[in-house]
Image (cartoon, grey):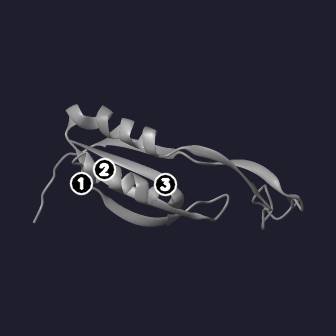
Amino acid sequence: MKLVIAVVQDKDSNRLSNQLIQKGFGATKLASTGGFLKSGNTTFLIGVEEERVEEVLQVIKDTCKSREKTVTPMSNMGGSSGETYVPYPVTVQVGGATVFVVDVQQFAHF
Protein backbone atom coordinates (compact mmCIF):
# COMPACT_ATOMS: atom_id res chain seq x y z
CA MET A 1 0.00 0.00 0.00
CA LYS A 2 1.09 3.57 -0.72
CA LEU A 3 0.17 6.96 0.69
CA VAL A 4 -0.18 9.69 -1.90
CA ILE A 5 0.16 13.18 -0.42
CA ALA A 6 -1.00 15.87 -2.84
CA VAL A 7 -0.79 19.59 -2.07
CA VAL A 8 -3.09 21.50 -4.44
CA GLN A 9 -4.36 25.06 -4.72
CA ASP A 10 -7.79 25.63 -3.16
CA LYS A 11 -9.22 26.46 -6.61
CA ASP A 12 -8.53 22.86 -7.71
CA SER A 13 -9.60 21.23 -4.44
CA ASN A 14 -13.31 20.59 -5.08
CA ARG A 15 -12.73 19.41 -8.63
CA LEU A 16 -10.03 16.98 -7.47
CA SER A 17 -12.19 15.73 -4.61
CA ASN A 18 -15.07 15.03 -7.01
CA GLN A 19 -12.80 13.22 -9.48
CA LEU A 20 -11.26 11.06 -6.75
CA ILE A 21 -14.72 10.04 -5.52
CA GLN A 22 -15.88 9.32 -9.07
CA LYS A 23 -12.85 7.05 -9.64
CA GLY A 24 -13.34 5.23 -6.33
CA PHE A 25 -10.48 6.71 -4.32
CA GLY A 26 -10.93 7.63 -0.67
CA ALA A 27 -9.11 10.74 0.54
CA THR A 28 -8.75 12.93 3.58
CA LYS A 29 -8.59 16.69 2.95
CA LEU A 30 -6.55 18.99 5.17
CA ALA A 31 -6.44 22.79 4.97
CA SER A 32 -2.91 24.08 4.48
CA THR A 33 -1.16 27.32 3.60
CA GLY A 34 1.54 27.88 0.99
CA GLY A 35 4.78 29.50 2.07
CA PHE A 36 5.61 32.01 -0.68
CA LEU A 37 2.15 33.41 -1.46
CA LYS A 38 0.68 32.56 1.94
CA SER A 39 -2.43 31.45 0.09
CA GLY A 40 -4.81 28.61 0.80
CA ASN A 41 -3.98 25.10 -0.27
CA THR A 42 -5.56 21.74 0.36
CA THR A 43 -3.49 18.70 1.21
CA PHE A 44 -5.02 15.36 0.21
CA LEU A 45 -3.99 12.14 1.94
CA ILE A 46 -4.89 9.24 -0.35
CA GLY A 47 -4.31 5.63 0.66
CA VAL A 48 -4.07 3.46 -2.44
CA GLU A 49 -2.96 0.00 -3.46
CA GLU A 50 0.38 0.01 -5.25
CA GLU A 51 -1.13 -1.07 -8.57
CA ARG A 52 -3.44 2.00 -8.60
CA VAL A 53 -0.79 4.64 -7.85
CA GLU A 54 -0.35 5.64 -11.50
CA GLU A 55 -4.13 5.94 -11.88
CA VAL A 56 -4.47 8.32 -8.92
CA LEU A 57 -1.47 10.34 -10.15
CA GLN A 58 -3.15 10.72 -13.54
CA VAL A 59 -6.36 11.96 -11.88
CA ILE A 60 -4.34 14.58 -9.99
CA LYS A 61 -2.42 15.60 -13.12
CA ASP A 62 -5.59 15.92 -15.21
CA THR A 63 -7.43 17.91 -12.54
CA CYS A 64 -4.86 20.30 -11.06
CA LYS A 65 -3.62 22.69 -13.72
CA SER A 66 -0.96 25.32 -13.19
CA ARG A 67 -1.63 28.91 -14.20
CA GLU A 68 0.00 32.31 -13.90
CA LYS A 69 -1.07 34.86 -11.30
CA THR A 70 0.10 38.41 -10.70
CA VAL A 71 0.69 39.19 -7.03
CA THR A 72 2.28 41.91 -4.95
CA PRO A 73 4.45 40.22 -2.31
CA MET A 74 3.77 41.46 1.20
CA SER A 75 7.13 40.35 2.59
CA ASN A 76 10.75 40.37 1.57
CA MET A 77 11.77 37.95 -1.13
CA GLY A 78 14.81 36.55 0.65
CA GLY A 79 13.46 35.70 4.07
CA SER A 80 16.22 37.35 6.10
CA SER A 81 16.05 40.83 7.57
CA GLY A 82 18.70 42.25 5.23
CA GLU A 83 16.95 41.27 2.01
CA THR A 84 15.18 43.65 -0.38
CA TYR A 85 11.42 44.07 -0.62
CA VAL A 86 9.81 43.84 -4.04
CA PRO A 87 7.35 46.78 -4.15
CA TYR A 88 5.84 45.90 -7.52
CA PRO A 89 3.63 43.06 -8.79
CA VAL A 90 5.30 39.89 -10.02
CA THR A 91 3.88 37.08 -12.10
CA VAL A 92 4.22 33.64 -10.54
CA GLN A 93 3.15 30.12 -11.44
CA VAL A 94 0.36 28.82 -9.18
CA GLY A 95 -1.81 25.74 -9.15
CA GLY A 96 -0.77 22.34 -10.28
CA ALA A 97 0.06 19.86 -7.56
CA THR A 98 3.02 18.86 -5.44
CA VAL A 99 2.77 15.12 -4.88
CA PHE A 100 4.64 12.69 -2.64
CA VAL A 101 4.21 8.91 -2.79
CA VAL A 102 5.39 7.04 0.29
CA ASP A 103 5.31 3.43 1.42
CA VAL A 104 2.78 2.51 4.10
CA GLN A 105 4.14 0.05 6.60
CA GLN A 106 0.79 -0.65 8.23
CA PHE A 107 -2.82 0.40 7.60
CA ALA A 108 -5.75 0.06 9.99
CA HIS A 109 -9.31 1.34 9.73
CA PHE A 110 -11.37 1.41 12.95
Q: Looking at the picture, does residue 57 appear above or below residue 69?
A: above
What label sits on residue 15 in the rendered view?
Answer: none
Q: Name the residue tied to disc 2.
A: 20
Q: Are marks 2 and 1 in contact (CB under 8 Å)?
A: yes
Q: Looking at the picture, does residue 59 appear above or below residue 75?
A: above
Disc 3 marks a residue whose amino acid type is Asp
Q: Name the residue tied to disc 1.
A: 26
Q: Name the residue tied to disc 3.
A: 12
Element on which disc 3 rests = helix
Distance (Cα) linking label 2 and label 3: 12 Å
Query: How far across and how far down the image is residue 73, in percent?
Result: 78, 62
Dot 3 alpha-carbon crowd within 10 angstroms: few under 14, some 14 to 19, many 20 or more: some
Write the residue at 23% across / 44% down.
48
Disc 1 marks a residue whose amino acid type is Gly
Question: Quadrant where the C terminus lies?
Answer: bottom left
Residue closer to the observer: 102 or 33: 33
Q: Which of marks 2 and 3 is nearer the N terminus?
A: 3
